[in-house]
Amino acid sequence: MTTLSRIIGILILTILIFLTSCSSDDDTATIPVSNETMTNAELTAYFTTLAENTEVPGFAISIVKDGTIVYQNAVGYANIENEEAYTNQTVNFIASLSKTFVGTATAKAIEEGYFTLDTNINELLPKPISNPKQPEAVITVRHLVTHTSGLVDNVESYLAHNYYILPEENVTTTGANILKDATGLEQRAARSLEDFLANYFLENGDLYSTDNFANVKPGEVWNYSNTGTALMGYIIETVTEQSFYDYVKQNILAPLHMNASTFNINEVNINATATCYLEQGIPLPKYAFDSYPEGGLYTNNEDMGNYLLEMSKGLSGDTTSLFGSSLYDMLFDYQLPNGIVPSNFADNHGLFWYAHNNLWAHGGNDPGVSTYIELADDGSWGYSMLSNMDAVFGANEAKYLQVKEKIEKGIQVYLESN
């Protein structure tokens, strides 16, 4: 397997890691539990020790329980070289955890009457998209939000012609050279979401290939699709006649007071964001991607706490802040017949959310970024995690899974004792 194939494989197959249990010796941190309760200070001490004794640069955690944010803190470094602390205000893009926001935006657009889950996407797009391997197939909104559309990520074009290093970045560093060599990324200006998708899905496009499509009937085979998610974002953009990032800001971020969050990279002070690390001592250059709805939300732990709380209340039926209760039900309802989603991955699908073992969850991994969100299916508790740790290159996936396991262990002890 080529390095490029390895990277895209990890991006797709470990983007959600809530199913993975990684056995490891519990020698990096001891959970300091008192006889009755584990305090917030004790949990922070545990996380601090974990960051100091592992290769994670920094991370931030929010925890909700019974309709309240009960814990919110960050440890480690946003920038190791400058000894800049990772804080609740540190901005990080969150990779594929962003897809849950696409799901929420889809629910809002459905409530506003723009389409239904069963609407043919070609009724919504300015130019129709046809799967050359299944030319008579009808792709619906439901297929996009459950990764069953038959629209897939072609390794050769999804990374090298979608991701890009930002123009002002130093591309002579060790991290930049590794990123360029492994993925073929270029340093360039952004291209529009519409241009990327047209080039990828339309026959006259520069990136068009039959490899962009699977020979399957929509709804019958699960195939994780970043490009399909980006297309869902573009559909929302098309039907609402406003940019996807403006629609999300107006209908999700602003109502939840997520004032530091945006999908619009032009609104971000890139120099103030967390530095992404391949490993300690090897920072990566700042990068982005044209298919931004599928992974490009910038946010911080303070804002993510608000989102986590809203989703927990949505599951428990205690909010209508974003839309009516029936839409929260849709967001977290099984959308597929049993057996479509691989059993080692999830039980079923909501609107981009995954269900497994009485949990709803989603994660995200891009070079130098690892994120995760998990909620009890009754909304009684949940947590989110942001970090600038890599889980894509080499042995970093296993290292990250070990760190995540220890984070979860601390969270569960905390929840059980409070």
Image (cartoon, rainbow, N blue to C red):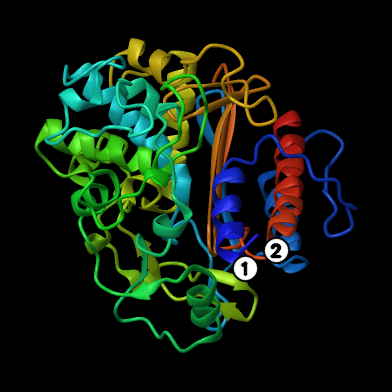
Is residue 158 or residue 191 the one in the foreground?
158
Q: Residue under circle 2?
A: 51
Looking at the figure, which quarter contains the N terminus? bottom right
Please, is residue 32 above or below residue 54 in the view?
above
Instruction: Name which residue lies at 41% across and 71% down.
Output: 185
Residue type at tag 2: Ala
Earlier along the polypeptide chain: callout 1 or callout 2?
A: 2
Question: Marks 1/2: CA distance?
Answer: 7 Å
Mark 1: amino acid? Pro
**In the rendered image of this protein, does residue 272 appear above or below residue 374?**
below
Numbered label tally: 2
Residue 100 placement (x, y as % from top left): 42, 35
Q: Position of residue 243 (x, y in %)?
A: 16, 44
On the rendered structure, is 409 left or right of 360? right
| Residue 191 appearing in the image | yes
Check residue 334 in the rendering and tell me which mark sits there, or answer none: none
* Quadrant containing the C terminus in the rendered view: top right
Q: In the image, what residue occupies the spot 40% across and 38% down? A: 213
Image quadrant where residue 212 sits: top left
Secondary structure, mark 1, is loop
- Left or right of 252? Residue 114 is left
* Residue under the image location 32 percent in, 51 percent down: 291
Quadrant of the rendered image containing residue 120: top left
Say whether marks 1 and 2 touch (CB < 8 Å): yes
With 139 as the anchor, is 240 left or right in this view? left
Number of the label disc, if any, that sits on residue 57 = 1
Query: Camera-side residue: 366 or 144?
Result: 144
